Amino acid sequence: MNPASPFTTSTDDGRFANGLAAEYFNNQATREIPMTPIPADAPATQAINEAAGMSRVEVEIEELRLKYPEWYALYDDAGPDFFVTRGEMAELMAAAPTPFALGLMYGKFCMRVEIAPNTGIAFV
């Protein structure tokens, strides 16, 4: 992918890609999450704090996957970042088995509400 823009339409080796969305779907098999690199001039504490926060989140998500497999399967299949309907999102929020899961869904709900007017993709 062209490092100058994460939203390119082709990768450097000529394969079709649709920016970060393509990276997301390509990485689903390995469960890697595409991350924007931290700028070189960012304070060292920013990288340390980001790594610490992401480590905590990874532990919580793995715990959800292991302890609540039915809920996690619904969450994973629904695709709350891109595809889930507003009603399905509400169901996932209502059935969230832990405070972390509820916060995760609330964050994704807010993200979808915020990006809908900017992308033109309705969140209904």
Image: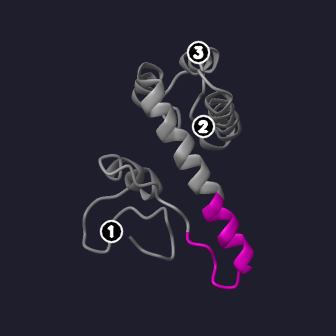
Q: Secondary structure at mark 1?
A: loop
Q: Please state, as top left, top right, bottom left or bottom right, where the N terminus lies in the image.
A: bottom left
Please name whichever residue, 75 or 4, is drawn nearer the observer in this view of the structure: 75
Determine the image quadrant of residue 119: top right
Q: Position of residue 56 (x, y in %)?
A: 61, 50
Q: Earlier in the sequence, mark 3 or mark 2?
A: 3
Kind of residue sitting beneath label 1: Thr
Q: Residue at x 66, y 39 (%)?
A: 111
Q: Residue at x 44, y 50 (%)?
A: 21
Q: Secondary structure at mark 2?
A: loop
Please, is residue 72 above or below residue 2 in the view? above
Kind of residue sitting beneath label 3: Ala
Kind of residue sitting beneath label 2: Gly
Q: Residues within 10 Å of mark 3 (few under 14, many from 20)?
A: few
Residue located beneath label 3 in the image: 95
Q: Earlier in the sequence, mark 3 or mark 1?
A: 1
Q: Position of residue 102 (x, y in %)?
A: 66, 27
Q: Residue at x 55, y 66 (%)?
A: 36
Determine the image quadrant of residue 100: top right
Please, is residue 77 above or below residue 37 in the view? above
Residue located beneath label 2 in the image: 120
Q: Residue at x 56, y 20 (%)?
A: 92
Cα–Cα gap, marks 2 and 1: 25 Å
- Range drawn in magenta: 37-52
Determine the image quadrant of residue 50: bottom right
Q: Nearer the viewer, mark 3 or mark 1?
A: 3
Q: Please state, as top left, top right, bottom left or bottom right, where the C terminus lies in the image.
A: top right
Res. 11 mark: 1
